[in-house]
Structures are given as C-alpha cells and as structure tokens.
Image (spheres, grey):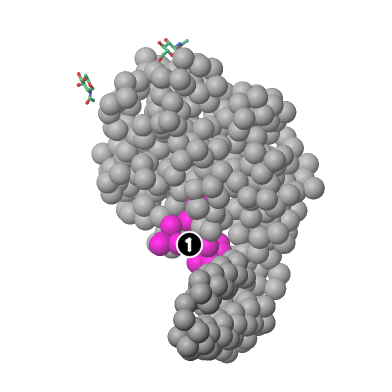
Amino acid sequence: MLETDHNKAFAKTMAQHKSFSSSPPSRSSVLNRYISLLNGFLFIVSILLLLGVFLPWSGSALFPFQNTISSSLPSNWRDYSLSQAAEFVAKDGTVIVCAVSYPFLPFLNNWLISVSRQKHQDKVLVIAEDYATLYKVNKKWPGHAVLIPPALDSQTAHKFGSPGFFNFTSRRPQHLLQLLELGYSVMYNDVDMVWLQDPFQYLEGSHDAYFTDDRTTIKPLNHSHDLPLPDRNGVTYICSCMIFLRPTNGAKVLMKKWIDELHAGSKAYEGNDQPAFNWALNKTAHQVDVYLLPQAAFPTGGLYFKNETWVKETKGKHVIIHNNYIIGYDNKMKRFQDFGLWLVDDHSLESPLGKLE
Ligand SMILES: *[C@@H]1O[C@H](CO)[C@@H](O)[C@H](O)[C@H]1NC(C)=O
Ligand SMILES: *[C@@H]1O[C@H](CO)[C@@H](O)[C@H](O)[C@H]1NC(C)=O
Ligand SMILES: *[C@@H]1O[C@H](CO)[C@@H](O)[C@H](O)[C@H]1NC(C)=O
Ligand SMILES: *[C@@H]1O[C@H](CO)[C@@H](O)[C@H](O)[C@H]1NC(C)=O
C-alpha cells in the first residue's frame, strides 16, 4: 500500500516533470529544483513510514496505536480472554462472532472471504472450540481467535449431533451474553454461510435482536418484521444461525432465557439449540423488541438452493446465503461448489487466513 502510494506519487511527479521540461528553460530549472526537493521529501516520508511499519518503535509517540495493540495480545493464546479478544477486534463497538471446530476451518475460510469482500473481516472473532483451531487461526491472523474453556476434544469434534457436541453448540448463548455484558453489539453467524452483500445495512432501527426465518414458505417481499406466528404445531422456526444483538436489556433477557431453555430441555432438543431459541423468543416476546430480517435478503438454504424460480425472481436481493437443509459435511461443500459459492479454491488470498493446507 505505502509503496504503491509512493510509486504513484513518484510517477505523477515524473509525469509533471516531463510536461514541464517543454516549457521555457528558465522557468523549468526553478521547477526542476522544486521537484527534486519534493521527491526528496516524499522519499524521507516513505522511509519514515516503512520504519514505522517494520520496526517495533516501542514508546514512540509517532505510533502509539500499534503499541496499544501489541501490548494487549498475550504471549500464550491460552491466556487470551474473551474480553481481551473482543476489545482487540471490535470496531465501533461491534463484534462479529462465529464458533468453529477444526474440521470446519475450510468453511470458516470460505465465509471469511465473503466477509472480507464486504470489508467487515477486521471485527471477526472466531470462538475456537478446540486448541488446534485456536493456534491455527491466531498463527495466521493474530488475535482473531479465542478459546473459552473447556475445549472440545478432537474425538467429540467429529461427532456432530452427539450429546458431547451439543454441549458445545449449547454454549453459544453464553458467549453472546458475555459479549453483551461487556457492552458490544454482536453479530453471530454459522460458518456455512456466504455473504453476497453487506448485512449491516439491513439492521434497520434500534431493535434488541435481529434474526431470520428458517421456514421455506415463500413470503411477500413486504412481509412483516415481527416475530412470525407459530405454525399449527405451535412452533416458530427462527434460525439460530444468524443473529444480531444490541447490548440492551432486552437482548440480555433473550440470551438468558435461551440459556435457561437449553438447560431445561437439553434432552428433548436432541442436539439442536434452535428450538430452545424459539421458545426463548416466544416466552420473552413482551420484553424484547425483535426484528425479523427480510426473507429475500436472508433466505434459508431450504429455499435458496431448492427453488430456482424464486432465486431468479429475487435476483440482486440476496445478502447472506445459508447452506442448511442438507445433511453431511461433504454434501454441504459440494452444494457450495455447485452454486459457485465455494470460494476457497480460487480466492483464498482474499481471506485473512490465506490458504489453509
Ligand atoms: C457437558 O458439559 C459439562 C460441563 O462442561 C460436562 O460436565 C459434561 O460431562 C458434558 N457432557 C457430555 C455428554 O459431554
Ligand atoms: C404488502 O403489500 C400488499 C399489496 O401491495 C398489501 O395488501 C399488504 O397489506 C402489504 N403487507 C404489509 C405487511 O405491509
Ligand atoms: C407462544 O407459543 C404459544 C404456543 O405455541 C402460542 O400460542 C403463542 O401465540 C406464542 N406467542 C408468541 C408471542 O409467539
Ligand atoms: C418456487 O418459487 C416460485 C416463485 O416464487 C413459487 O411460485 C413456487 O410455488 C415455488 N415452488 C415451491 C415448490 O415452493
């Protein structure tokens, strides 16, 4: 960046130099002297900037920002706390979080490429579910992964849907609540998602919680932003996959209720935290100001990947695509590939993690 900028400035000066040399000699020699002075000045500025980037000038008043950052990072990532991590990544009081175990790193990278394209990667915090993920992410992208003990052991990590695995996904509302208590707005995403546009522009108003409907039934474009009515089984299908929360009492009440519901019914939910989230929404409806995001912008995978007609009709409106309504890791990956949403093979350099081997 710096070098490019300097080169551009240099090229511009050279171009001016050329055009000036066709003017009368007396004027030109004064200008030449001025230009060489300017070049010298640019050169010194460049050197100063390069030194600032490559040398750790501890205590320098010129680069106080850098010092703040490096002093807040621990020497061992095991000691990195959620509050330190949130402080490090947050921008304008907002953090984007996901929770990932080692086998899902390719999906994390895919999602990160899409987030980077919308220029929101700097505020991403990866909640690592195992130490391998913690070290891998922080090695490639220091400070952007945190592990909240206990860690998932590698055996359990592969057993999606097992009680042990559920134990982990069920900690999600606790992490979100902790971030709210620290005063941050939080966006949570599953990593089997791809951003096509910037979701933040859709977070209209100042509601406590924003989420999407996982039902495949097609709604009119102007559908209501209220919590949908329960279906004839008395349940709603709000997705726990994409949630935005402001650090308000309402959002905290909702997270606490979600935690209670998970504890109360962990057997009944059979490894899925989504029903508990829906009961929490139902039971806190009078205390929490919620906002249902537009279906055309945030469609469930059960609609986006299954109804080509609808996708054509709503072209240009899609913001985040969720690769759900499919079972199996390989099937998920293949579906992203089939729909041109598997970005890691050709675009890994756009991810802050680069290419994962
Ligand atoms: C779930 O987590 C709790 C506390 O972390 C632990 O005591 C329990 O053994 C775990 N259950 C399973 C099935 O892994
Ligand atoms: C959506 O638009 C239709 C037709 O224009 C209208 O009848 C309906 O009331 C609108 N619904 C909402 C929720 O605004
Ligand atoms: C909560 O769930 C009950 C039972 O399904 C339903 O009758 C009620 O309308 C729901 N309340 C809200 C606010 O969705
Ligand atoms: C697919 O989408 C079209 C256009 O919105 C709709 O008319 C049709 O009913 C949908 N098909 C299914 C199977 O939902």
Residue 73 versus residue 64 in the image, above or below? above
Q: Which residue is pictured at 41% across the width and 55% down the height? A: 185
What residue do we see at 53% from left, 32% from top?
A: 322
| 253 left or right, relative to 276 | left
Q: Is residue 252 visible?
A: yes
Whether residue 94 appears in magenta in the rendering, the answer is: yes
- Tell me residue 187's x, y (percent): 46, 48
Between 41 and 121, the residue placed more toward the observer is: 41
Circle 1 crowding by C-alpha within 10 Å: few under 14, some 14–19, many from 20: some
Note whether 314 is above or below 258 in the view shown.
Answer: above
Instruction: Tell me the amino acid under the disc marked 1.
Output: Ala
Relative to 114, residue 269 above or below? above
What element does badge 1 sit on? loop
- Which residue position is annotated with label 1? 90
Q: Position of residue 19 (x, y in %)?
A: 50, 71
Residue 283 seen in the figure: no
In the current view of this chain or complex, which residue is farthest to the front?
24
Q: Is residue 201 left or right of residue 4?
A: left
Q: Is residue 92 magenta?
A: yes
Q: Could you tell me residue 190's position as x and y percent?
A: 56, 40
User: On the picture, is 223 further left or further right than 124?
Assistant: left
* Picture quadrant where residue 213 is located: top left
Span shown in magenta: 82-98
| Quarter of the displayed picture in which ligand 4 can be seen | top left
Residue drawn at point x = 45 percent, y = 20 percent: 312
Where, by quadrant of the figure, is residue 193 drawn?
top right
> Horizontal and vertical percent for residue 1?
59, 66
Counting labels gives 1
Considering depth in this image, is 337 or 100 the residue closer to the camera?
Answer: 337
